[in-house]
Image: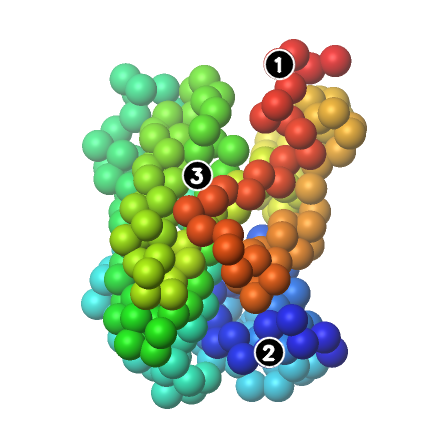
Amino acid sequence: MADRLTGKRIFLTGAAQGIGLAIAEACLAEGAKLFLVDRDGKLLDKTVAGLAASHGSIGHVAADISDGAAIAAAVRQAGEEIGPVNALINNAGMNVFSTPLDATEEEWNRNFDVNVKGAWNCSKAVLPGMLASGGGTILNIASTHSFTIIPHTFPYPVAKHALLGLTKSLALEYARQGVRVNALAPGYVETQKAIDYWNSFADPAAARAKTMALHPGGRIASAREIALAAVFMISDESPFMNAATLVVDGGLSQLQHPA
């Protein structure tokens, strides 16, 4: 086991699968203590059982990040089980794709409740402890949707743009008290959601190939590649990184036209 995250007590949301699970695995391998949160309690229990087989006891609770009271209680529970939280990874999120005039009020509200309010609920719950102890780090898992627009994905990019605003605001507000707040912006990642998307087409292989062809390197990221970037950003190897967004998209967002 490596020790890049020894001493880190991490509160990680959206941890039951996909990028969240990959981040959990990478953080445990680097010596961190984890408290995992996910809305899907059954899947979270299964995930934790699998991780605990190799890494020992892991704190966890099923909770909806849009529920501020539930998250405040989860942070208190985390303090009892792994010690005061000194690192937060806001990974939980949801896709809401529509066109502006077709998006319902319910879709708009749920999009912001999860993708922005949820990150704020978690940050608000851990910040007092971080400030009292002299510092900590918060990492928001954003997206390339945070600064680029794909038509027909409204209102998801609106919320992701707002998430970067939250990141910068908190980072500058609390920098002098030792709290760093940054964002990580993945592009396309090969998760189950991506596979489900490809499988929604009559020819899944062709849909997958089309996605790969968009990228300069001809492939998309693995969840582990995003997790390794997250480890760096919450580790003490990036002590002067603050109010920053690290883009991990294989260069896609810099490409003016696909080849």
Front residue of 234/225: it is 234
Instruction: Work out how far the residue at label 3 is from the one at label 1, CA to CA, in angstroms.
Output: 25 Å
Residue at (74% x, 25% y) in the render: 216
Residue 91 against residue 38 in the figure, above or below: above
Q: Taking 51 as reference, is 133 left or right?
A: left
The residue shown at (33%, 40%) is 165
Q: Residue at x 62, y 14 (%)?
A: 256
Q: In this view, does 175 lie above or below 221?
A: below
The residue wearing badge 3 is 95
Would residue 31 be visible to someone looking at this image? yes
Q: Which of marks 3 and 1 is nearer the N terminus?
A: 3
Would you name the residue on which mark 2 appears?
6
Label 2 to label 3: alpha-carbon separation: 33 Å
Of the residues shown, which amino acid type is indicated by label 1?
Gln
Visible in this render: residue 92?
A: no
Which mark is in front, 3 or 1? 1
Q: Which amino acid does label 3 sit on?
A: Asn
Give how far across and how far down residue 252 sits, in percent: 64, 27
Identify the residue under disc 1. Answer: 256
Q: Looking at the image, which is closer to me, 97 or 148?
A: 148
**Mark 2 / mark 3, whichever is N-terminal:** 2
* Labelled pair 3, 1 in contact (Cβ < 8 Å): no
Local secondary structure at mark 1: loop
At label 2, which amino acid type do we have? Thr
